[in-house]
Image: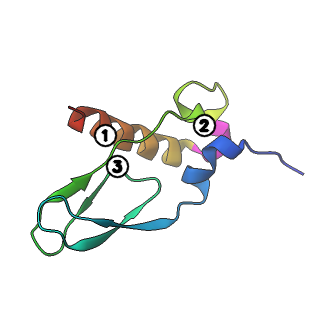
Amino acid sequence: MEVKCPGAAMMREAVPEDVICQHCGNELEIWSDEARAKCRKCGNYYVRGLSQSCLDWCAAAEECVGAEALDRYRREKAISESAAP
């Protein structure tokens, strides 16, 4: 049985979350592995920070979640960090 880090579950098993657009108040869906989602009503982006993850420092991160998922995480993390005040 292959053991995987529970800290990387948000990338391996992303789940949807309902949030409110900061611009127009519309309800929209964002996935747990995403830093932003585009509002269908006003066209603006809802942006949130991604918390620290073992994917930020673990030498086995690519093996754990796969190269594509790790690249996607790094892109989303950069988006969340660039939007931080």
Q: Earlier in the sequence, mark 1 or mark 2?
A: 2
Disc 3 target residue: 35
Residue annotated with mark 1: 80
Residues packed near mark 1 inside 10 Å, few (<14), some (14 to 19) or many (20 plus): some
Q: Identify the residue shown where x is 27% and y is 73%.
A: 27
Vertical side of 3 occupied by 30: above or below: below
Q: Mark 3 and 1 residues: CB-CB less than 8 Å, in contact?
A: yes
Residue 69 position within the rendered picture, expressed as x and y whole percent measured from the top left: 51, 48
Q: Which residues are magenta?
A: 62-66
What residue lies at 82% left-to-right and 45% top-to-bottom? 3
Q: Quadrant of the C terminus?
A: top left
Mark 2 belongs to which amino acid? Glu
Q: Nearer the viewer, residue 31 or 26?
A: 26
47 sits left or right of 60 in the view:
left
User: Image height check: is 72 above or below 52?
Assistant: below
Residue occupying image coordinates x 46% and y 53%: 33
Between tags 2 and 3, which lies in front? 3
Q: CA distance from mark 1 to mark 2?
A: 20 Å
Task: Report the colour scheme.
Answer: rainbow
